[in-house]
Image (spheres, grey):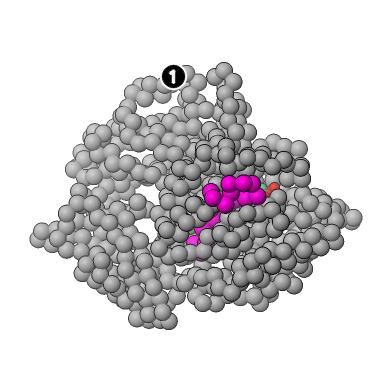
Amino acid sequence: MLYPQQTATRTLEDLSGMWKFRAETEPIDATKPLSDFVWMAVPASFNDQTMDQKLRNHLGYFWYETGFNVPVDQLNKRNVLRFGSVTHNAEVYVNGKLVVSHTGGFTPFEVDVTEQLVAGENDLKVRFNNLLDNSTLPSAALAKDGDKYKMQTRFDFYNYSGIHRPVRLYTTGATYLDHIWVNYTVDGEVTKIHPEIHVAGDYVTATVEVIDEAEEVVANSESLDGELTIEHTHRWQPMNAYLYKLRVTLRGKDNELLDTYTKEFGVRTIKVENGKILVNEKPVYLTGFGRHEDSLASGKGLNMPLVNMDYQIMKDMGANSFRTSHYPYSEESMQQADREGFLVIDEVPAVGLFETFNVAVGIDMKKGETWKHLTTHENHKRALSEMIERDFDHPSVIMWSVANEPASHEDGAHEYFEEMINYTKELDNQKRPVTVVNIQFADADHDLIGDLLDVICLNRYFGWYIDFADLEAAKCNLKSELEKWHQLYPDKPIMFTEFGGDTVDGMHSLLRVPYSEEYQVDYYKANFEVFDELDYVVGEQLWAYADFVTDPGMIRIGGENRKGIFTRDRKPKMIVHYLKDRWTNLHHN
Ligand code: GCB
């Protein structure tokens, strides 16, 4: 599936706007206009657009409705309806008829609706749910009490839902391109490209061109499976991006133009060797954050001005990377990450694969039987393949994260992840490194899957959930755990994908107590002191970039996780200035 594009052969219409919306509190007939609705902006989460608390917190099914007009000429084309994402589970109805269902809240899906469309006004309805259970990604415990759902999520962010990313109607001819992957190998300056291109329908001739940033055609081929060579390659470098375009054109009899599509890509290598992550054969040290798609009013909905602002803030601070914790981010933000040169760890929504998980990590949890009780296999594989299909050509993606903090210390974890990691490696022709982000419970003494990973990625909270307010003990324990990991896997790089402590902006303390901005500074300095002594530590991604909304909870002040180094509205906490200084003076890269 390609990102929708207006080209000489394709039209594109964005159906964003104000749609009708309601909860399914009674049976709804898809052939009738929606009654008792409220207005909702699309794309966005529905939750924070309403003052109706019952609606905000409703668990179950919901409906959206909109109308759109189709000119009579457009009916001669192939019409495709495409959703950037619907969280978590969607059924789409066009003029009353079910046209597609999709499971998984963070990847795109599309459907050919040509048969269902009429000239003039058409009706579009989307039924979705915000329910998660033992089979879904993310994971939750779901029960039903009469006709009421009860859900206990196993993750630490608010379960925003709805149509989160753009809804578009695009057209193609009967012959169209529907998959392009730019496979390449690069040796010095010379890049050999063997694109993987799928076409539906018949064509007579094809051209494939590689275009550089000066809009010069630097390689071309007259067949879809021909080799293309860039003689003097301009590599895509971390924080110094360079993007090529691959333009594919199909023609029919009499040279008639059938389809044309242009896809951006970058040329870089990525490899793990001798305890280092190498980009373009050079070791990189990752600086940056775990983040969330989370903003005022939009919830988890696409908010490009904020994405852009965040990228500029991160660049200014000397951050060169982030993880898409805990789900694939929007296509638009990935495209922009390519252009800025960020190094991205791309994560599937496999968060909460830990049966007895509780947000209050300090609470002693008994060992569960996660791998006996979860039935996520099928959904996990689908989420991996949809993420890789979508994100394959992003040069920014340097590693796949197959899960965040699963119960990797429980029996059955090795079998489960061996299967998922092998599957990921089979799908990715680029053979990027693969990781599973490790939880503190599954420390070096208990984890069962470290041997499967290319990079050991640790989420550690010494000085917060463990050794609270005791940074001396935190440093000792952190160091001794790191030494154990290194002993176990001396050739594997180790990086931090999370570390942090809740900090209330504006709270100051001469005693530098936890929750104050002073403690956050001390906490990070203590962690950095340990990292800086160990050359096998190859990266530091703080938790988190900004405060974000969670379920209400005793340790979630104001319904937010406050570990951000910025508040939710991007006010800097004290640590920001220290970090900028550290990262802009780091000589690791
Ligand atoms: C974690 C999770 C993250 C939480 C964080 C916290 O380990 O991966 O989703 O938000 O801890 O702040 O507790």
Residue at point 57%, 60% (across, down): 453
Which quarter shows the C terminus?
A: bottom right
Residue 364 in the figure: left or right of residue 239: right
Residue at point 33%, 31% (across, down): 98
Say few, some or many: other residues with alpha carbon within 10 Å of mark 1 (under 14 / 14 to 19 / 20 or more).
Answer: few
x and y, in percent, of residue 130 in the image: 52, 34
Regarding residue 449, the answer to whether it shows in the image is: yes
Q: Tell me: residue 529, above or below residue 381.
A: below
Amino acid type for the residue under numbered disc 1:
Pro
| Viewer-proximal residue among 96 and 308 | 96
Regarding residue 70, the answer to whether it shows in the image is: no
Residue 477 in the figure: left or right of residue 406: right
Q: Residue furthest right?
A: 511
Q: What residue range appears in magenta?
A: 396-416
Q: Secondary structure at mark 1?
A: loop
Residue at point 17%, 54% (across, down): 202
x and y, in percent, of residue 156 in the image: 65, 43
Write down the quadrant of residue 539 in the picture: bottom right
Q: How many marks?
A: 1
Task: Say whether mark 1 is within 8 Å of ligand 1.
Answer: no
| Viewer-proximal residue among 98 and 417 | 417
Residue 409 is covered by the magenta coloring: yes
Residue 326 in the figure: left or right of residue 223: right
x and y, in percent, of residue 499 in the image: 70, 56
Residue at point 44%, 46% (across, down): 382
| Viewer-proximal residue among 297 and 124 | 124
Residue 236 is covered by the magenta coloring: no
Residue 334 in the figure: left or right of residue 259: right
Q: Which residue is mark 1?
A: 27
x and y, in percent, of residue 445 in the image: 71, 56
| Viewer-proximal residue among 184 and 341 | 184
